[in-house]
Image (cartoon, helix red, strand yellow):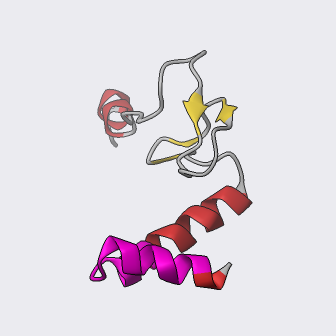
Amino acid sequence: MLNPSILSSVHVEETALPPEGSEIVCANPLCSAIFKPGGVANSPKRFCGDPCKQQASILRRAAKLLDALPDDQAIGILREIS
């Protein structure tokens, strides 16, 4: 039989969440929403909602595609698309 004190130490998790009562700014660079921390400890909530999460993902992919280009050419491409 396992010792319960061993199990309790095994199940202790460190949390990556900010202290209780603090607020988080959305990780999407185009959003400035502030919200309460949430999510599980190994995957804390970083975005105010799914649309912001998707937008940030699109921005990261576009940045990788445009990274090799000079800034003025990358900006020109982005302006043509809109």
Front in this rendered view, residue 54 or 41: 54
Q: In this view, does 3 lie to the left or right of 44?
A: left
Q: Can you give x and y, in whole percent of width and height, for residue 29 in the image?
A: 53, 50
Residue at coordinates 64% horizontally, 46% vertically from top-left?
31
Q: In this view, does 53 lie to the left or right of 13?
A: right
67 above or below 30? Answer: below
Residue at coordinates 63% horizontally, 67% vertically from top-left?
54
Q: Can you give x and y, in whole percent of width and height, for residue 39 in the image?
A: 59, 43
Does the magenta-highlighted stretch encompass residue 70? yes
Does the magenta-highlighted stretch encompass residue 54? no
Answer with the quarter of the image where residue 34 lies: top right
Q: Can you give x and y, in whole percent of width and height, for residue 36 in the image?
A: 66, 29
Front in this rendered view, residue 31 or 41: 31
Magenta part of the protein: which range?
62-79
37 above or below 79? Answer: above
Q: Can you give x and y, in whole percent of width and height, for residue 22 in the image?
A: 56, 19
**Magenta stretch: dominant secondary structure:** helix
Front in this rendered view, residue 80 or 30: 80
34 above or below 77? Answer: above
Residue at coordinates 33% horizontally, 27% vertically from top-left?
5
Answer with the quarter of the image where residue 58 lies: bottom right
Outermost residue on the top side: it is 21
Residue at coordinates 49% horizontally, 19% vertically from top-left?
19
Front in this rendered view, residue 2 or 26: 26
Give the number of marks: 0
Q: Quadrant of the C terminus?
A: bottom right
Answer with the quarter of the image where residue 1 lies: top left
